[in-house]
Image: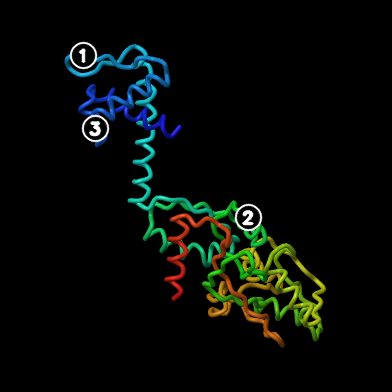
Amino acid sequence: MNNLLSLYNVFNTVAATGSISQAAKVLYVSQPAISKAITNLEECLNQVLFVRNSRGVKLTEEGQILYKYTKEAFDILKQGEDHIKRIQELGIGHLKIGVSATLCKYILLPYLDRFLKTYPHIKITIESQSTIHTLKQLENGTLDIGLVAKPANLKMYEFIPVAEIEDVFVATKDYLDNLRLREKYEDLFSAATILLLDEENISRKHVEEYFKDNNIIPQHILEVSSMDLLIEFAKTSLGVACVIKEFVSDELNSGRLILIPLKKPINKREVGFCYSKSAYLSDSLKKLIDFVRLKNE
């Protein structure tokens, strides 16, 4: 097939120029080599493709039919080459990123804002989902990279830390004051409504481990689907919410929410970009990885 492709290229060039000598100049080969290639192709197809005349060569009827297809084929190949060159010149690419809605809002978007100013021709697709789903997709190769809490097992993944987060409990002053009026309690967790993310969430699992290690048994739990809702529910005085401290800094500084002191703080966690060690690193993915590493030096 490779030999035939070379013969078709010679044929297409001769047909386009109408001259063996001109085709030899275009392809940087000798005229005898061009003539030999045409003869070989005619023998392969068992057809006469050119007739010689005083001005050079002319396509036969069969040659005209073949040229229609070879011209279209080589034009498409040229378009492909031009497209690849354009991709290289402009840095065109595509990245699929997996991230939870919370990490997307508070960490990923600020990174992408700066990244896309540097590489405006890279298209970004964001899969908004749990960390568990992101890691599964990284494993099966349907995502390029994810922004996740540091996995417990890094055997299959490369992890680039970008932030440290701390899980805390917060509530409004009104909620705590009213709770004290109607409940006489020694243990806040047994009396208050505790607002938590759903059980499949990585943050929830982290907090459940903390409860278990510290013999804390909440009596009234209200599950919420997202961190933003947890924060809003807490600000509406619906209960004591487990949130990420860095994401409620404004509310804590303004006094809108109050930090609940714990006998033992919940261990902080690392958040970072994660990709499979076996993944193909496209040019776009390499750019993002280098960008993240540079920003965190």
Q: Picture coordinates of residue 102 (x, y %)?
A: 59, 64
Residue type, numbered disc 1: Asn
Name which of mark 1 and mark 2 comes first in the sequence. Answer: 1
Q: Label 1 vs label 2: CA separation?
A: 64 Å
* Number of marks drawn: 3
Q: Real-space Cα distance between discs 1 and 3?
A: 20 Å
Q: Residues within 10 Å of mark 2 (few under 14, many from 20)?
A: some
Circle 3 — which element? loop
How did the renderer colour the structure?
rainbow
Q: CA distance from mark 2 to mark 3?
A: 55 Å
- Which numbered disc flags the more N-terminal residue, 1 or 3? 3
The percent coordinates of residue 23 (x first, y second) are: 24, 29
Instruction: Decide: is 69 above or below 179.
Output: above
Task: Identify residue for label 2.
Answer: 137
Judged from the image, the secondary structure of the residue bearing numbered disc 1 is strand
Q: Using the image, tell me which numbered label, if any, was put on residue 30.
A: 3
Mark nearest the camera among 1 and 2 is 1
- Kind of residue sitting beneath label 3: Ser
Q: Earlier in the sequence, mark 2 or mark 3?
A: 3
Residue at x 61%, y 70% (from the top left corner): 150
Q: Identify whether 181 is placed above or below 291.
A: below
Q: In what quadrant of the picture does the C terminus appear?
A: bottom left
The reply to whether dot 1 and dot 3 touch (C-beta < 8 Å) is: no
Density class for disc 3 (Cα within 10 Å; few <14, some 14-19, many ≥20) is few
Which of the labelled discs sits on residue 53, or is there none? 1
Lateral position of residue 58 relative to residue 297, left or right: left
User: Circle 1: is it few (<14), some (14-19), or many (20+) Cα within 10 Å?
Assistant: few
Q: Check disc 2 and report its element: helix, strand or loop.
A: helix
**Picture coordinates of residue 222, whole percent (x, y):** 75, 66
